[in-house]
Image: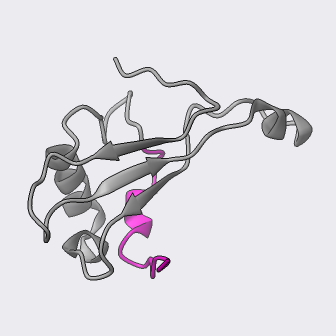
Amino acid sequence: ELSTSPGMAYAIRSSAEGYSSKLSLGVLPVLPSASEALGLPPSPYRAASIITRQDHDVLSLGAEAAEAFFTDSFPQLRFSGPHSCVSGGELSRLPGSKGVTL
């Protein structure tokens, strides 16, 4: 099982190779004090950013195809089932996302 430190940021590289296929997940740190200040219980999820090119195919996939893509690209993570690293409904938001260009 993958274990992380809540206060650390991580970059997880995909298993895909080549300019048109590879991407990374940027996992942001979680500050427990933020949840406590809002009176919320700690969340088992952490925010992650998809880091890739603006024209990557993953940005146009539907939820089921995105789940299959991420499962193939990140075999060390689970994208479905009771131990999924993605909260319900998040993959369905992907096709409508415009993303951010830096």
Instruction: Give residue 55's position: percent from left, percent from top.
Output: 26, 82
Would you identify the image quadrant in which residue 62 lies?
A: bottom left
* Of the pair 80 and 59, the residue shown nearer to us: 59
Is 50 covered by the magenta stretch?
A: no
Q: In the image, is residue 54 above or below residue 14?
A: below
Would you identify the image quadrant in which residue 12 lies?
A: top left
Taking the image as shown, residue 82 lies to the left or right of residue 71, namely right
Residue pictured at 85% horizontal, 33% vertical: 36
Residue pictured at 19% horizontal, 62% vertical: 65
* Of the pair 55 and 64, the residue shown nearer to us: 55
* Main SS category, magenta section: loop
Would you identify the image quadrant in which residue 43 lies?
A: top right
Instruction: Give residue 95's position: percent from left, percent from top.
Output: 35, 75
* Of the pair 31 and 80, the residue shown nearer to us: 31
Residue furthest toward the left? 18
Residue pictured at 30% horizontal, 75% vertical: 53
Q: In the image, is residue 6 above or below residue 99?
A: above
Taking the image as shown, residue 8 lies to the left or right of residue 40, namely left
Residue pictured at 49% horizontal, 77% vertical: 102
Which stretch is magenta? 86-102
Instruction: Give residue 72's position: percent from left, percent from top.
Output: 14, 46
Q: How many labels, in total?
A: 0
Is 92 covered by the magenta stretch?
A: yes
- What colouring style does the render use? one colour
Q: In the image, is residue 64 above or below residue 93?
A: above
Q: Quadrant location of the N terminus?
A: top left
Residue furthest toward the top? 1
